Image (cartoon, rainbow, N blue to C red):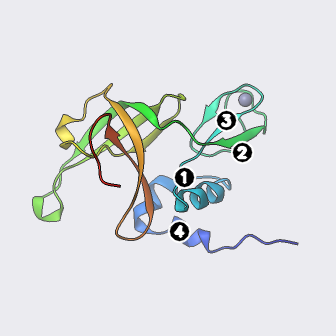
Amino acid sequence: MAFSPLTTAKTLNTPSTQNMFSSLPATTETYLNELKQGRFLIQQCTHCQTHLFYPRNFCIHCSKDTLTWKEPRGSGSVYSTTTVRRKPEAGGDYDVSIIELDEGVRLMSQVLGVAPHEVKIGMRVQLKIITEPSGQNKVVFYPEGVEHVA
Ligand SMILES: [Zn+2]
């Protein structure tokens, strides 16, 4: 009998992931483990081909449990964008955007590489996984063609 380690549950309560991940179902563990390894995965239903994110146990389109993990191409567009105001001494303004991947799924993330007010709806972006100072991996996006540091 194999037991899954419960240590992953601690990850859910850390400040930097709390907002994004606190309401996710059991498949979250697989998702987060893959993210730790530097892979961002979405799901695809093998019955109706619908792509899903965030992780679920059943297809939102046909309700079957025929979901498989898939690494998206990573290209997408800015679906909506907000500049969050913050004092310079606290790190300055930053972007919060909803990105629609070309697979059709949307996720809340951040566009880096340009000033927050330069992020525009419809802007083509490319997914990148960065490691935060805390050591946790985070999914961000850069405008296509913008150089970035891995
Ligand atoms: Zn389906």
The kind of residue on which mark 1 rests is Arg
According to the picture, the residue beneath numbered tag 2 turns out to be: 57
Measuring 53% from the left and 62% from the top, which residue is drawn there? 36
Q: Earlier in the sequence, mark 1 or mark 2?
A: 1
Residue 69 vs 5, above or below: the answer is above
Q: Label 3 neighbourhood size at 10 Å, few (<14), some (14-19), many (20+)? A: many
Res 115 → quadrant: top left
Q: Position of residue 121 (x, y in %)?
A: 30, 27
> Any mark on residue 44, and which?
3
The kind of residue on which mark 3 rests is Gln
> Any mark on residue 11, and which?
4
According to the picture, the residue beneath numbered tag 1 turns out to be: 39
Q: Label 1 neighbourhood size at 10 Å, few (<14), some (14-19), many (20+)? A: some
Measuring 39% from the left and 38% from the top, which residue is drawn there? 126
Work out whether residue 112 or residue 24 is closer to the camera in this orientation and state it.
112
- Disc 4/disc 3 C-alpha distance (Å): 25 Å
- Disc 1/disc 3 C-alpha distance (Å): 16 Å
Q: Quadrant of the N terminus?
A: bottom right
Res 130 → quadrant: bottom left
Q: Earlier in the sequence, mark 4 or mark 1?
A: 4
Q: Position of residue 124 (x, y in %)?
A: 34, 29
The kind of residue on which mark 4 rests is Thr
Q: Quadrant of the C terminus?
A: bottom left
The reply to whether discs 2 and 3 touch (Cβ–Cβ < 8 Å) is no
The residue at the far left in this view is 88
Secondary element under disc 3, as helix, strand or loop, is: strand
The kind of residue on which mark 2 rests is Asn
Secondary element under disc 4, as helix, strand or loop, is: helix
The reply to whether discs 4 and 2 touch (Cβ–Cβ < 8 Å) is no
